[in-house]
Image (cartoon, rainbow, N blue to C red):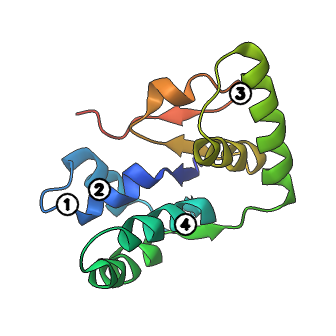
């Protein structure tokens, strides 16, 4: 049974007036026992709300409609170690990715989850990471 780690761009799609149909369909079909999000994603979502007018109202929408849809994965020791190794490997190869994305990739690797994201080309640089683009029709 496939288990997924949703990238921030997947979950934030639910905030749009017209979410991408295939993303909405996938999110609606998966129970929290098969759909996970990293605490890094919670950080990114909260950070975004801190930057906009009526951020507290937006945060309330996220707390009500997005956060309960997933099981939350801590950025634990296994995630930390996998991320450190990944960052070093990518830097040595001259193909670095940003630290938050590296944390998501490290978490997915450590917990054997498939990363669902719009940013497939970016994450394809990560050896061993299984990636799916839910934004395809």
Residue drawn 70% across and 50% down? Answer: 107
Q: CA distance from mark 4 to mark 1?
A: 19 Å
**Would residue 33 appear left or right of 28 to someone viewing this image?**
right
Q: Position of residue 70 (x, y in %)?
A: 50, 68
Image quarter hosting the C terminus: top left
Q: Using the image, tell me which numbered label, if any, was put on residue 128.
A: 3
Nearest to N terminus: mark 3 or mark 2: 2
Instruction: Using the image as rendered, state which of residue 69 and residue 118 is in the foreground.
Output: 118
Q: Position of residue 33 (x, y in %)?
A: 57, 67
Q: With respect to residue 22, does 89 lie above or below?
A: above
Q: Using the image, tell me which numbered label, if any, was put on residue 16.
A: 1
Q: CA distance from mark 3 to mark 2?
A: 26 Å
Query: Badge 2: how crowded within 10 Å, few (<14), some, or many (20+)?
Result: some
Q: Quadrant of residue 82?
A: top right
For disc 4, the marked residue is: 43
Query: Badge 4: how crowded within 10 Å, few (<14), some, or many (20+)?
Result: few
Q: Are marks 1 and 2 in contact (CB under 8 Å)?
A: yes
Is residue 38 visible in the rendered structure shown here? Answer: yes
Q: With respect to residue 61, does 91 lie above or below?
A: above
For disc 2, the marked residue is: 13
Residue drawn 80% across and 62% down? Answer: 76
Instruction: Using the image as rendered, state which of residue 82 and residue 55 is in the foreground.
Output: 55
Secondary structure at numbered mark 2: helix
Q: CA distance from mark 2 to mark 4?
A: 16 Å
Nearest to N terminus: mark 2 or mark 4: 2
Q: Using the image, tell me which numbered label, if any, was put on residue 94.
A: none
Count the marks: how many? 4
Q: Please name which of the two marks, 3 or 2, marks the residue nearer to the observer.
A: 2
């Amino acid at each position: 049974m496939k288990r997924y780690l949703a990238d921030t761009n997947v979950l934030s799609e639910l905030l749009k007036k017209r979410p991408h149909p295939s993303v909405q369909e996938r999110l609606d079909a998966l129970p929290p026992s098969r759909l996970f999000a990293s605490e890094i994603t919670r950080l990114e979502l909260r950070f975004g709300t801190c930057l906009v007018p009526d951020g507290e109202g937006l945060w309330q929408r996220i707390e009500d409609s997005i956060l309960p849809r997933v099981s939350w994965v801590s950025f634990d020791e296994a995630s930390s170690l996998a991320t450190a190794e990944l960052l070093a490997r990518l830097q040595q190869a001259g193909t670095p990715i940003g630290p938050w994305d590296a944390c998501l990739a490290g978490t997915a690797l450590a917990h054997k989850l498939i990363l669902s994201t719009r940013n497939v080309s970016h994450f394809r640089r990560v050896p061993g990471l299984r990636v799916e683009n839910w934004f395809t029709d």
